[in-house]
Amino acid sequence: MSDNEATLPADPRAYVEQVMAEIAEEVRLRRASGDLPPKLERELDELFLAHSPVAGRGGDLGEALRMVDAATFIDPVVPVESERAAGAVVKKGMRSLLLWYVGWLTHQMSQSASAVSRALHIVDDRLQQLERQVEVQRVPGATVVEFPDLDGPDAWWVEPAIAAVAKAPGRVLHAACGDGWLVRRIAAAGGDAYGVDPRSHVVDRAELGILDLRGEGLAEHLRAVAAAGLGGIVLSGLVDGMAGGERTQLLTAIATRLAPGGTLVVHCVSRDTWNSATAPPEADLSPGRPLRPETWCHLLEEGGYEAAAQPGPGGGDFLITAVRSSVVTPYPPTER
Amino acid sequence: MSAAAGRPVAVHQFIPALNPHDATGTHTLKLRDALRAAGWRSEIFAEAIHDDLAPEAYKHWMYPEHAAEGDVAIYQFTTSSAVAGYLAEHRLPLILDFHNFTGPELFAGWEPRGEQRAVRAADELALLAPQAVLGLAKSSFSERELRRAGCRRTAVVPVLADYGRVAGPPDPRVAAELVALGADGGADILFVGRIVPSKAQHELVKALWAYRRLYDAQARLHLVGGTSSFEYTKALQGFAHDLGLSAAVRMTGEVSDASLAAYFGAADVYLSLSAHEGFGVPLVEAMVAGVPVVTRGAGAVAETVSGAALVLAAADPAYIAAALHRVCSDDRLRATLTASGRLRGAELSGDAAAIRIVDAVSGAVAR
């Protein structure tokens, strides 16, 4: 590579920005061509998670207990492979010499771990009993609530939503993505989009070989996304039925995953629409109720966004577009 | 410069741990020399002192033996330490030299002790920041954290580092080894830093996998630096093994300055996907060494490289792979990044940085 022979640009910053745009386009084309199917990227994530400790996977107690059980037996026969020729021989010799001693220690450790594992299983059983008892008082998580007249590719809010995120500084996530109709539109507009939907049966029908769609809940998915890893998030059909606690948790997770300067787009319905006779049964069964546009703007501005509401033509729904400030303030700054 | 009348007789530094070949340790030693050159008495007091630096510092609890009326303390804030409580108790006029620290969320699930230490560090920052007469930050990103913690007066000053070490004579044995590795072609991708979850070396492995699959099947990744997270290191090794990259991902452990120079000398590109950086000394070292930098814009990174690198918004393997390919195959881009990087490296190097810190300290203690 001849660094010195190349002609330097007059404005290096503008040139680097142009290169970044070309790289983004290259990625889009590569993805579209199927060179790096979305499934492979998902598998990479899952493969690394398989090596992480239990707590790093965000797994439940049952999963943790299965790992405890698997790790209860401590193998005293250490592997002896080596990159160096004599290394394996030396290691094997050391293993033979020490096996009587290491084996005695590991036997006791395995017994100790078995006792701890047994105790944890008893705790797990008791917890499950308690969970059954409190189940009747539990506030359920919100399900996806879609209004056929207000959702889908022909809805009025689709174009403004695409315009808001197509040039986002990073990948764009749509939830709930359904069969990927909005993901496809954002990609066509030049964005690098993917989707998640808790209704895995809907996602399974989609063209997984072309679009990156994942059948999982939004909160669960965000836990696996790196901090500031997303450039844009579009939420539709998800937040109107959420109870306050669930909504706060979601916004907190979004605040850490959305890159500074990133855009959050939320499509919401009005309370009249929510309460109308034509509303789907999921609306009635949801634990929460829709917020007013003013409340959404207030909530997001408190969280460090610049937010604006756009009412729908019939007054039955509205779109919130919020840009995350480039300066993140998780708690109020002190006076300078 | 000499100590003028009315100045404090000493500006001492306190630090959690004084280690050689460590950004904070180097900064502290260089600042001590600059303070002495400015006419002040200046010693270093630490909770832990590496054997190699034993003659350079005292244990922090030995400070009373050196104390005098009018002393000022500079605390090199890097992590939680007993030194923080010690300084809060002694109520010396305090200057916080803030190097930032990794938040607890980035240790979660990997290093419970690291998580607890980060929580304690946040508490200690909140304790000391309101007491400080001045807060020195290594970036505007860190300055905002100091302000939020209650520091009323702040300044941004660079890290005092020995960037020249990467341009020194390379270790011939390591250099020859790297030449042999590259005999069959393939790009050498370099990252320098401790192996810990916040540095996100697993994202580097993902990027290497994608880059090899899409563009350069012979590419190698050199991870230079020791580890302070056994769990994460084991996970990283297992991950690379499962991807068939055991030979392509080389984890060197800690290396000498000469070896480091050899790695920078052989690198085609420096890649950082850290989730958090308060400054990023290795980024500057890469720029000084003339290695093009591709990096994720986490924390203060964008500010540190200041337009002299490809700063990516996301860490998606496909995106990183495309950026690596472009840097490794586009001569004009390489030349642009190399030239801009050297200029930026020069801005952050040299005596000017030390003078800026001494001036800031002078201004604070004269009040």
Image (tube, coloured by chain):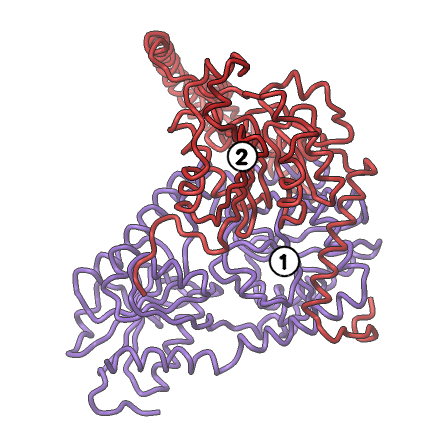
Chain colours: A red, B purple
Q: Are marks 2 and 1 in contact (CB under 8 Å)?
A: no
Residue B184 place in picture, x, y as percent: 84, 53
The answer to whether residue A57 is visible is yes
Marks 2 and 1 belong to one chain: no
Q: Which of the two residues, A257 or B205, is positioned nearer the viewer here?
A: A257
Q: Residue at x 45, y 27 (%)?
A: A290
x, y (%) of residue B22? 47, 63
Question: Is residue A71 visible to the viewer in this orientation of the structure?
Answer: no
In the image: residue B60, left or right of residue A140? left
Q: Residue at x 60, y 53 (%)?
A: B296
Comparing A29 with A7, the one in front is: A29
Specify the quadrant of the image occupied by residue A101. top left
Residue A326, above or below B52: above
Amino acid at circle 2: Phe
Q: Which mark is residue B311?
A: 1
For the residue labelled by badge 1, is the local secondary structure a helix, a strand or a loop?
strand
Q: Going by the picture, which residue comes out furthest to the left? A: B69
Secondary structure state at the residue bearing disc 2 = strand
Is residue A216 shown left or right of residue B129?
right
Question: What residue is disc 2 on?
Answer: A318
Who is closer to the viewer here, B44 or B351? B351
| Letter of the chain that mark 2 sits on in the rendering | A
Q: Chain of mark 1?
A: B
Give the CA distance from mark 2 to mark 1.
Answer: 35 Å
Q: Which disc, if any, is residue A234?
A: none
Q: Quadrant of the C terminus of chain B?
A: bottom left
Q: Nearer the viewer, residue A3 or B360?
A: B360
Disc 2: CA contacts within 10 A as few (<14), some (14-19) or many (>=20): many
Q: Position of residue A249 (x, y in %)?
A: 42, 33
- In the picture shown, does residue A311 fall above or below A123? below
Q: Quadrant of the N terminus of chain B?
A: bottom left
